[in-house]
Image: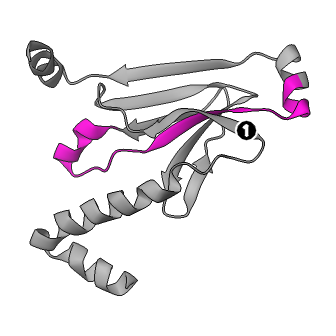
Amino acid sequence: MRDLFALCTLFPPLRALALALNRCLRRFELHEPPVGAQVIGQPHTDSARAITCLGGDRERMLTEILDETGWAPLSFETDSIYIMPSDQCRAHDLEPTIHRYAIRHDEAGAERQRTSTNATLLIGIVDLPRTASSLSH
């Protein structure tokens, strides 16, 4: 089945259909919560920004992205930044990053939160012509 799917993605008329089917099937995995944490809101892609850049230093808050194997946690350090394409990047043949946020409920994390900072830096790059046209509607 995987080989058939891969062959379909090689032919432009079938590629869009195969990728749409793949997005629909992935939704079944979206609601499995991380161990020892509670998901905040729904898994999503960013539609208001062209690109989202995340950085910071966090102890209890998790950001996870969905890849081929499932949910993968992002490790936030003060010297790292993650760049995620959004829905607007589809025009440039980039798939948007499905991501979600969660809060850890473990006791060790609660103790660390009292002694450390939890900071997130969000940089959003906006496509002004698209934003202006969506605001006029």
Q: Position of 5 compared to 29: left or right?
A: left
Residue 68 coordinates in the image, percent (x, y): 48, 63
Residue sitting at 8 percent across and 13 percent down?
136
Residue 108 coordinates in the image, percent (x, y): 90, 32
Task: Judge whether residue 89 is colored magenta.
Answer: yes
Figure quadrant of the N terminus: bottom left
Q: Secondary structure at mark 1?
A: strand
Q: Nearer the viewer, residue 17 or 95?
A: 17
Figure quadrant of the C terminus: top left
Tally of numbered discs: 1
Identify the coloring: one colour
Residue 107 figure quarter: top right
Q: Nearer the viewer, residue 68 or 125?
A: 68
Residue 129 figure quarter: top left
Q: Which residue is mark 1?
A: 37
Residue sitting at 37 percent across and 22 percent down?
124
Q: Which residues are magenta?
A: 86-110
Q: Is residue 99 above or below residue 68?
A: above
Q: Position of 137 compared to 65: left or right?
A: left
Q: Nearer the viewer, residue 80 or 75?
A: 75
Q: Is residue 33 above or below residue 5?
A: above
Residue sitting at 54 percent across and 19 percent down?
121
Residue 64 figure quarter: top right
Q: Position of 69 compared to 23: left or right?
A: right
Residue kind at label 1, given as amino acid type: Ala
Residue sitting at 64 percent across and 46 percent down?
33
Q: Is residue 86 above or below residue 123?
A: below
Residue 49 coordinates in the image, percent (x, y): 31, 26
**Label 1 crowd bin: few (<14), some (14–19), many (20+), radius 10 Å:** some
Residue 101 coordinates in the image, percent (x, y): 58, 33
Task: Judge whether residue 46 is colored magenta.
Answer: no
